[in-house]
């Protein structure tokens, strides 16, 4: 039996990367999926998935467009069972060089876009007394790194609003959970499309010692979208090769063998 049989889902940021992998996996598991993205490529991605998929041009910061898309999906299918707030942008800049406009832009797409999505879809799920919202945060929404002040702020916001929504919507049968990827091989982290083998050599601080495939992340979304996770509410699921589990003291027992440790004293924590 397909794990998402008959479910109606919306996945944002689905033209490529993790969103496309999620939409594809959802369709494989029996869902009908609406893919949305600012990129026109979303049409081709939906077409490649097949008749279970449809495409919408969509900027997640545009509240009116959210209302159009949700109304259209409900008119076509009668309900919405799953919302995946996946669309996101990344920016590397330190605190002192990040402008207020840049901070606002990243917060707007990653955090406000997620908020509008939940706010627009939740009333339909409440009416059905059932639904699952899965928000794509990040490992940087749990344990951030330097040069990610805007991105990490936005992903902490997603993690926080997930929990508030889980508290408020849970009594209405609507579950809200967050996924926290790290090191997933997409255009966001690998814009030059370097081969995975080359990337893996630099992943010494990840317990997995390798990049993750978007499909490995998509499996987590399937679980949280499906009824298998019926008792998960406000949960955080990391899919990051172990990155947020902690850090290594290279040179002491238990650290990965045969890798070059960063130059530092043995009692200093390894940086990410
Ligand atoms: N790749 C990773 O290791 C990683 C790690 C942590 C979190 N994430 C998160 O996973 C999500 C997917 O990222 P990805 O790695 O697949 O990167 P990606 O850049 O391939 O995909 C992001 C998608 O979001 C779309 N998008 C951007 N702004 C949008 C907007 N305003 N409205 C609608 N769509 C918009 C893009 O066009 C793109 O298709 C993001 O939220 C990202 O922050 C990724």
Image: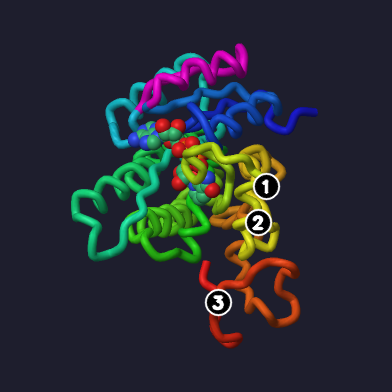
Q: Does the magenta stretch include residue 43?
A: yes
At 46% from the left and 53% from the top, the residue drawn is 162
Q: Is residue 184 or residue 255 the one in the foreground?
A: 255
Q: Position of residue 115 (x, y in %)?
A: 37, 45
Q: Is residue 175 or residue 206 the one in the foreground?
A: 206
At 47% from the left and 42% from the top, the residue drawn is 188
Q: What stretch is highlighted in magenta?
A: 39-58
Quadrant of the rendered image holding ligand 1: top left
Which residue matches tag 2?
241
Q: Which dot marks residue 229?
A: 1
Quadrant showing the N terminus: top right
Packing grade of label 2 (10 A; few <14, some 14-19, many >=20) is many
Q: Is residue 89 above or below residue 44?
A: below
Closer to the camera: disc 3 or disc 1?
A: 3
Q: Where is residue 208 in the image (x, y as percent from the top left)?
A: 70, 58
Which residue matches tag 3?
263
Q: Position of residue 194 (x, y in %)?
A: 56, 40
């Amino acid at each position: 039996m397909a794990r998402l049989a008959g479910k109606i889902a919306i996945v944002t940021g689905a033209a490529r990367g993790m969103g496309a992998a999620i939409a594809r996996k959802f369709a494989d598991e029996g869902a009908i999926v609406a893919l949305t993205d600012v990129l026109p490529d979303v049409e081709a991605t939906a077409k490649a998935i097949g008749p279970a998929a449809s495409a919408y041009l969509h900027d997640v910061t545009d509240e009116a467009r959210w209302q159009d898309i949700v109304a259209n999906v409900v008119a076509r299918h009668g309900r919405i069972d799953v919302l995946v707030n996946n669309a996101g942008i990344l920016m590397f800049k330190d605190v002192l060089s990040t402008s207020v406009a840049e901070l606002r832009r990243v917060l707007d797409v990653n955090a406000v876009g997620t908020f509008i999505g939940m706010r627009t879809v939740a009333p339909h799920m409440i009416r059905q007394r059932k639904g699952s919202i899965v928000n794509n945060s990040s490992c940087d929404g749990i344990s951030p790194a330097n040069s990610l002040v805007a991105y990490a702020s936005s992903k902490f916001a997603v993690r926080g609003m997930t929990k508030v929504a889980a508290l408020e919507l849970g009594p209405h049968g609507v579950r809200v959970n967050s996924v926290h990827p790290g090191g997933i091989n997409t255009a966001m982290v690998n814009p030059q499309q370097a081969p995975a083998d080359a990337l893996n050599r630099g992943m010494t601080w990840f317990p997995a010692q390798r990049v993750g495939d978007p499909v490995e992340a998509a499996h987590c979304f399937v679980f949280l979208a499906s009824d298998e996770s019926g008792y998960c509410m406000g949960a955080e699921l990391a899919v990051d090769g172990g990155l947020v589990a902690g850090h290594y003291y290279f040179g002491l027992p238990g650290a990965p063998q045969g890798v070059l440790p960063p130059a530092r004293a043995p009692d200093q924590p390894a940086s990410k």
